[in-house]
Image: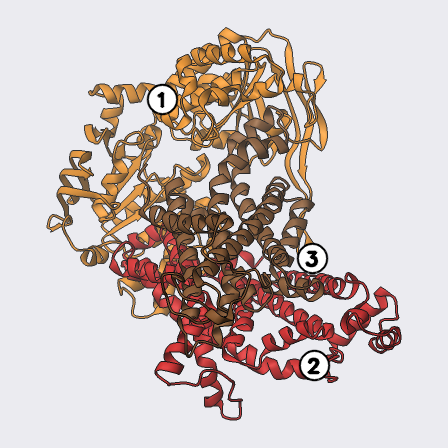
Chain colours: A brown, B orange, C red
């Protein structure tokens, strides 16, 4: 099967950032947690490849650890969303036409009424802002997304003859969901996961920007943007670089997701809305 | 008086990516005449139709000549010029009436659209008035112009499509499998409507179909296609009674299987359905409740060992619902179903489940596309506590029984043809060594020649394994070929049942009589224009 | 049709009720005592007790909840702890900025997305389509607040066409609109990209349906088929996205206000969080959720207008 060009390009970009983030777990050029005001606002040099910010921190190191933050939050949020959403969606499809389906769908609609930002506001207003709460907010909002996509993919499968054949043989709905339904919608879920991954990066950046995400001294791209805002007249690069990273990673993930979808099944394009 | 040729195809060739789909096709359509183009799936008949109207899919190209009214050559015209001809000089109707109409547009507007696009009427009001006339003509006088397609039945929707296609009084009408998706009585209505239109308007009708019985009752001339070429053409009566080409001969014999020679049944009674009713509970529609829907009412049947019971009826008559109750998939609200002493219901024990199995209609949706054939066939055994080495040997046996090889267990379903997939479905049905197999339109989606072979297989398996069949179908030739007894259903009620020869030759209930009369028959002479 | 309307209205009221319970519980119930939470660790017991009495926290859960809901229905959102003024007044002032911003952005994004999406679908696979899709990919990936900063950099700082921020007030409609233009544009572009993609794929899917083939067989050109048959059917999935978009737009607006120093709901709620003014946070959250639920309801009604199959 010919591998799509978008998958290659997107995959390369995404892996680049992933590698950067993983590397930062072990090593960064300079410590990001301590301030060194003496070195503030230097341009790019041999020691500071991308210069320093107004607190004297190395921009490159900040970006690397920021990548870590964004990716960790987005991935954890997907874990919550898919871990709870997919079983719910499978259950709803299996119980189609009955109370269980109705209940899950109403619950879904209810969560959709709370944009991720509003959930984050609620949680941080009562428990205080933190990366954990950002994960919770984005994750909770991911649940109905995965539930809806899973259910939409599973429903048409239940009417197919081979499912009926399994029921004639006496298989329980639970076993059918695991052995037949889930493998056939896995592609759908994987592609949705890449979409939610990129949305999670954007959401984490937005939350950190307004101060509701990872707190100092943990670096985060969004907060870098907030801090750079006051410097934008004199040092625009401090605002451009983190934003460019966000955009690049999200673009890479989206391209990879599109390419993955076309690669796995050209007909999938119709199932995803 | 020779009829003037309306459409002439000369040496038409259609290619796709270098491969030829249609080669050297020549055909003439004359006014006031119905020409049938007959072939199995993949023979190229639909492609021919699309080439005529210039709607071939991307990547296909057509060569040769297509002459309309002796002068205009259609191939090579720009799309703009073809748009002027489509709907105005050449009308076309397609196979699936359920999806042929725009669901959010009123039917009056959809018919009037043809008139307005070709500026036949001066304004919208005149177009709607004329649309009303045309709709009346196709038998929809009772249906208001502002109805939407979803409010109409399949047959009615096809009539709307016909109205839109003939509104501008075209010279040629192409009907591509226009009645295939409809049940027998509806089909009859549409076919006689088409016949009337041809007689009254002088159109040339190109009737594309795979059903030779339809050809027999409708067409003046017929051309038989196989693998992109016309193998034989001529006047219908002659071709059907004295075919010359071997393919035509094979097609004809496969299309008219001999009725079964039934012997009196001596086996013990395996299954008895006693007073079974299946009622769907009322649905909550917003604030109102609908009526409970009685899908099956007071059904009584018996099935002996070795017997083949045919269940016939139009769509929506309840035959599939009854089958699901017999299989223990749904519970009957009234009455009971007894299989060899034990009751059949959705919670029945698994040892009893293995005695029932099913073969479905659609060879393409019958299997999980991710499972290998071996696993597909073995699935019913998953719940029967069979040791794994025995499973493998049973799968191999089953494959051989249906005429495939044990190596095929490693392949995937998409690697097989439609007929082979039905064989795999039969193998899956046999794996639990059942007593009763339900065949739900199991051969309806197969080409005629393939169908004959699968039916032969089913017959020999029945003999060999002492199986009982419940054969659900709408096709009376098939049921005549297979069944010992027949039950006829209408609106959830079994209106008549008895030994097959008796039902087929001397039906008593008016519905059965109507069914037998309206079903097109291969040996019928083309009827003179009957108005539906 | 009537039963469909009532059904949806009922669903809306139910959603509002459940949402209000969730918000109430989260803020007033879970963290323990709201009063001491608001006053902080150094508050005296007496101050806390006074605040409790003042805020009406002495009653049981259910009466407090009902009082809160009852008040909201009448337009009384309580008194802000920080400012000692009715929250309703605060909200009204800020809404005068946030609501027009969201609507402005919605109009911009739709106006941009529809012609672009239709063009891409009509010329599928050709250059216009590929260019549009590439642009859309970038549009989706841009964080809107960063885009806003770049716009400020370009238009306000380099070109000096508009001011870098602040709201000019509605006394002069033109001036008010001008100060909202850059923010609305920053909000609209990513949303337009999403909408264009959705419209394109909905159109492409519609174009594969059988009734399109019927239309062509009647003699309609490709263009006529697209506009008269495909667009209306594609409108249905697009409506869903528009509804979802609104909630994203609202959230986006709140964040964007930060970049442009606009005195909108965003500033109100973030100040409320930092100042621990839970009454403000509660009320604004409820308002946001109400807006989203209302829009969902309107979208459901729009479905019925577009698709006659729903009008049983």
Specify the quadrant of the image occupied by residue B333: top right
Callout 1: SS? helix
Give the x, y percent position of residue A100: 68, 45
Left or right of residue C311: residue B330: right
Give the x, y percent position of residue A61: 46, 58
Please tell me which residue lies in front, B64 or B531: B64
Q: Is residue B334 above or below residue A201?
A: above
The reply to whether label 2 and label 1 mark residues of one chain is no
Q: In which quarter of the image is the C terminus of chain B?
A: top left
Please tell me which residue lies in front, A205 or A35: A35
Q: Earlier in the sequence, mark 3 or mark 1?
A: 3
User: Which residue shows up at 68% across the image and 43% down it?
Assistant: B292
Residue identifier under label 2: C88
User: Which residue shows up at 49% across the image and 17% down it?
Assistant: B501
How much space separates mark 2 and mark 1, taking CA atoms?
76 Å
Residue identifier under label 1: B450
Callout 3: SS? loop
Residue identifier under label 3: B287
Please tell me which residue lies in front, B192 or B41: B41
Q: Is residue B177 above or below residue C166?
A: above
Specify the quadrant of the image occupied by residue C195: bottom left
């Amino acid at each position: 099967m010919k591998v799509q060009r978008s998958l290659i390009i997107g995959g390369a970009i995404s892996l680049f950032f992933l590698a950067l983030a993983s590397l930062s777990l072990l090593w960064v050029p300079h410590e990001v947690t301590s301030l060194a005001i003496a070195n503030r606002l230097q341009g790019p040099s041999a020691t500071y490849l991308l210069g320093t910010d107004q607190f004297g921190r190395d921009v490159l190191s900040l970006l690397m650890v920021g990548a870590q933050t964004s990716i960790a939050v987005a991935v954890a949020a997907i874990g919550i969303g898919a871990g709870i959403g997919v079983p719910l969606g499978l259950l709803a499809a299996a119980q189609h036409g009955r109370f269980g389906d109705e209940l899950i769908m109403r619950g879904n609609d209810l969560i959709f009424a709370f944009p991720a930002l509003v959930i984050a506001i609620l949680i941080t207003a009562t428990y205080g802002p933190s990366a954990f709460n950002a994960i919770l907010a984005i994750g909770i909002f991911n649940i109905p997304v995965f539930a809806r996509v899973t259910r939409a993919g599973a429903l048409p499968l239940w009417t197919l003859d081979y499912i009926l054949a399994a029921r004639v043989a006496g298989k329980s709905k639970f076993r059918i969901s695991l052995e037949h339904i889930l493998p056939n919608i896995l592609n759908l879920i994987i592609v949705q996961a890449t979409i939610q991954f990129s949305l999670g990066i954007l959401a984490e950046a937005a939350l950190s920007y307004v101060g509701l995400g990872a707190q100092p001294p943990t670096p985060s791209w969004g907060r870098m943007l907030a801090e750079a805002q006051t410097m934008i007249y004199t040092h625009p690069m401090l605002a451009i670089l983190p934003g460019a990273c966000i955009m690049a990673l999200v673009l890479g993930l989206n391209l990879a997701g599109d390419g993955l979808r076309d690669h796995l099944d050209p007909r999938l394009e119709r199932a995803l809305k | 008086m020779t009829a003037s040729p309306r459409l002439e195809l000369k040496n038409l060739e259609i290619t796709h990516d270098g491969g030829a789909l249609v080669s050297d096709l020549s055909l003439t359509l004359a006014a006031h005449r119905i020409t049938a183009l007959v072939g199995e799936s993949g023979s190229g008949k639909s492609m021919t139709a699309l080439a005529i109207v210039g709607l071939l899919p991307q990547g296909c190209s057509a060569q040769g000549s297509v002459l309309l009214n002796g002068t205009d050559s259609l191939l090579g015209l720009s799309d703009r010029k073809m748009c002027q001809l489509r709907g105005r000089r050449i009308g076309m109707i397609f196979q699936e009436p359920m999806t042929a109409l725009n669901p959010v547009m009123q039917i009056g507007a959809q018919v009037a659209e043809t008139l307005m696009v070709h500026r036949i009427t001066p304004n919208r009001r005149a177009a709607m008035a004329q649309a009303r006339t045309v709709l009346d003509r196709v038998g929809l006088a009772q249906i208001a112009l502002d109805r939407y397609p979803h409010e109409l039945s399949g047959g009615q929707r096809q009539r709307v499509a016909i109205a839109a296609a003939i509104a501008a009084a075209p010279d040629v009408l192409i009907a591509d499998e226009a009645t295939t998706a409809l049940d027998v009585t509806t089909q009859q209505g549409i076919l006689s409507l088409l016949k009337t239109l041809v007689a009254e308007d002088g159109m040339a009708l190109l009737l594309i179909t795979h059903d030779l019985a339809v050809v027999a009752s409708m067409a003046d001339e017929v051309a038989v296609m196989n693998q992109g070429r016309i193998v034989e053409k001529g006047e219908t009566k002659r071709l059907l009674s004295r075919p010359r080409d071997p393919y035509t001969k094979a097609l004809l014999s496969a299309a008219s299987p001999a009725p079964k020679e039934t012997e009196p049944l001596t086996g013990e009674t395996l299954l008895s359905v006693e007073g079974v009713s299946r009622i769907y509970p009322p649905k909550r529609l917003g604030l109102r409740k609908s009526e409970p829907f009685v899908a099956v009412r007071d059904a009584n049947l018996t099935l002996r060992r070795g017997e083949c019971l045919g269940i016939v009826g139009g769509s929506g008559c309840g035959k599939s619902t009854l089958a699901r109750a017999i299989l223990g998939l749904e519970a009957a609200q009234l009455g009971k179903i007894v299989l060899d002493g034990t009751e059949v219901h959705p919670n029945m024990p698994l040892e009893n489940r293995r005695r029932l199995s099913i073969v479905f209609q659609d060879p393409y949706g019958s299997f999980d596309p991710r499972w290998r054939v071996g696993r597909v066939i073995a699935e019913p055994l998953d719940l029967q506590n069979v040791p794994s080495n025995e499973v493998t040997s049973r799968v191999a046996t089953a494959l051989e029984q249906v005429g495939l090889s044990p190596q095929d267990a490693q392949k995937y379903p998409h690697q097989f043809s439609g007929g082979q997939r039905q064989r795999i479905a039969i193998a899956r049905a046999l794996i639990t060594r059942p007593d009763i197999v339900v065949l739900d339109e199991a051969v309806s989606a197969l080409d005629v020649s393939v169908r004959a072979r699968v039916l032969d297989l089913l017959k020999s398996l029945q003999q060999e394994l002492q199986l009982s069949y419940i054969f659900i179908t709408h096709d009376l030739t098939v049921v005549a070929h297979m069944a010992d007894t027949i039950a006829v259903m209408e609106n959830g009620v079994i209106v008549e049942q008895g030994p097959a020869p008796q039902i087929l030759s001397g039906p008593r209930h008016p519905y059965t009589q109507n069914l037998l009369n309206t079903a097109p028959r291969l040996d019928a002479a083309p009827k003179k224009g009957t108005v539906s | 049709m009537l039963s469909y309307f009532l059904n949806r209205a009922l669903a809306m009221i139910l959603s509002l009720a459940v949402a209000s319970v969730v918000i109430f519980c989260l803020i007033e119930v879970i963290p323990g005592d709201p009063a001491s939470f608001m006053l902080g660790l150094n508050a005296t017991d007496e101050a806390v007790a006074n605040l409790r009495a003042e805020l009406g926290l002495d009653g049981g859960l259910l009466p407090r909840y009902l009082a809160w809901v009852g008040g909201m229905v009448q337009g009384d959102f309580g008194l802000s702890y920080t400012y000692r003024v009715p929250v309703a007044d605060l909200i009204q002032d800020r809404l005068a900025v946030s609501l027009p911003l969201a609507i402005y952005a919605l109009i911009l994004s739709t106006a941009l997305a529809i012609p672009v999406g239709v063009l891409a679908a009509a010329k599928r696979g050709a250059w216009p389509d590929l260019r549009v899709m590439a642009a859309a990919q970038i549009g989706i990936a841009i964080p809107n607040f960063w885009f806003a900063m770049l716009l400020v950099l370009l238009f306000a700082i380099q070109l000096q066409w508009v001011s870098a921020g602040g709201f000019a007030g509605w006394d002069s409609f033109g001036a008010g609109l001008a100060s909202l233009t850059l923010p609305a544009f920053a909000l609209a572009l990513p949303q337009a990209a999403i909408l264009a993609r959705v419209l394109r794929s909905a159109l492409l899917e519609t174009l594969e349906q059988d009734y399109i083939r019927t239309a062509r067989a009647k003699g309609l050109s490709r263009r006529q088929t697209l506009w008269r048959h495909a667009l209306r059917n594609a409108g249905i999935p697009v409506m869903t996205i528009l509804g979802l978009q609104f909630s994203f737009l609202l959230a986006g607006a709140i964040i964007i206000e930060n970049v442009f120093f606009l005195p909108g709901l965003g500033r109100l709620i973030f100040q409320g969080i930092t100042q621990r003014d839970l009454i403000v946070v509660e009320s604004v959250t409820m308002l946001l959720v109400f807006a989203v639920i209302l829009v969902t309801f309107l979208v459901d009604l729009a479905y019925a207008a577009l698709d006659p199959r729903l009008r049983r």
